Structure formats: structure tokens, C-alpha cells
């Protein structure tokens, strides 16, 4: 537990130092906005945090599973982007029956991401 808290604190400190170096006049305001961003706006703000964090969490989970099994793969974010692109491309260009409208883009995304590796 302690190493996790130390790593989070060091990451926040590094981010603040970068903000301080790039724009000293606004560093405090920006850092405060980053820390409170998900809590402003009630349920909408928290929902936005989950909306934007979910792809990152999924990529991180995929990389963690790979590392745990001994497979080294640093192409996770690229595979995610390629998969998303091909899912949208397939969904918008192919005229498929309604029950398969989610399955065919999903298979296309998985195939494109697997080939990207």
C-alpha cells in the first residue's frame, strides 16, 4: 500500500513540476483543476471520468495480463486505436442485419488489432 501511495505522490509532484516549468503563473490553477476535475459537475463529472478512463484501463489491463503471463507487448495503445478505427469503419460501410451489427465490427476490430501487432 505504501509504495502505491508514494508512486502516486511522486507522479503528482512530477506533473506539478512540469506545469510549474511550462507556465509558472497558471500552474497552481491548472493543478487544482486536474485534481478536482472529476468532482465538479456532480454525476456528469464522475461519468466523464469513467468515460475517458475506460479505454486507458482496458489497455492497461491487457498489458498487465500480458506481463503476468510472460509476454512482452508494448503495442497496446496502437492496437486499441487500430481496433477502434476498424470497428467504426466496418460498422459504417457494411450493411449487416441488425442482430449482427455489433458482432461483425467486433470481429473486425479484433482481427485488425491482432494484425497490427
Image (cartoon, grey):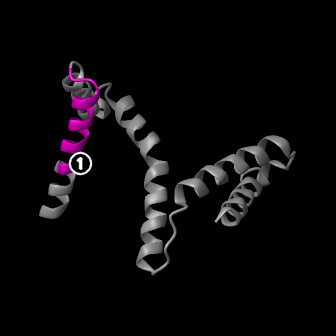
Left or right: residue 13 compared with residue 66: left
Q: Quadrant of the C terminus?
A: bottom right
For the point 40% across and 36% down, the residue is 47
Most distant residue in the front direction: 21
**Chief SS of the magenta region:** helix
The answer to which image quadrant residue 112 occupies is bottom right
For the point 60% across and 57% down, the residue is 79
Q: Is residue 94 visible?
A: yes
User: For the residue carrying disc 1, how many other residues have a C-alpha within 10 Å: few (<14), some (14-19), or many (20+)?
Assistant: few
Q: Nearer the viewer, residue 71 or 62?
A: 71
Determine whether the residue tagged by mark 1 lies in a helix, strand or loop: helix
Q: Position of residue 59 (x, y in %)?
A: 49, 58
Q: Tell me: residue 72, above or below residue 58.
A: below
For the point 77% across and 50% down, the residue is 101
Q: Position of residue 36 (x, y in %)?
A: 24, 31
Most distant residue in the left direction: 2
Q: Position of residue 78 (x, y in %)?
A: 58, 54
Most distant residue in the right direction: 95
Mark 1 lies on residue:
11
Left or right: residue 61 compared with residue 84: left
Q: Nearer the viewer, residue 101 or 23?
A: 23
Left or right: residue 107 compared with residue 72: right
Magenta stretch: give its range: 10-24
Residue 15 included in the magenta stretch of the image: yes
Q: Position of residue 54 (x, y in %)?
A: 46, 49
Residue 53 included in the magenta stretch of the image: no
The answer to which image quadrant residue 20 occupies is top left
For the point 85% across and 46% down, the residue is 94
Count the labels in the image.
1
Most distant residue in the bottom direction: 70
Q: Quadrant of the N terminus?
A: bottom left
Amino acid at each position: 500500500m505504501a509504495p502505491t501511495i508514494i508512486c502516486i505522490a511522486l507522479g503528482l509532484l512530477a506533473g506539478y513540476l512540469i506545469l510549474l516549468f511550462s507556465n509558472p503563473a497558471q500552474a497552481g490553477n491548472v493543478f487544482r483543476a486536474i485534481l478536482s476535475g472529476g468532482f465538479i459537475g456532480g454525476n456528469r463529472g464522475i461519468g466523464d471520468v469513467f468515460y475517458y478512463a475506460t479505454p486507458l484501463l482496458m489497455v492497461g489491463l491487457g498489458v498487465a495480463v500480458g506481463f503476468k503471463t510472460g509476454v512482452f507487448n508494448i503495442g497496446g495503445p496502437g492496437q486499441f486505436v487500430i481496433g477502434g478505427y476498424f470497428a467504426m469503419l466496418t460498422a459504417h460501410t457494411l450493411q449487416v442485419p441488425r442482430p449482427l451489427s455489433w458482432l461483425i465490427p467486433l470481429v473486425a476490430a479484433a482481427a485488425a488489432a491482432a494484425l497490427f501487432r
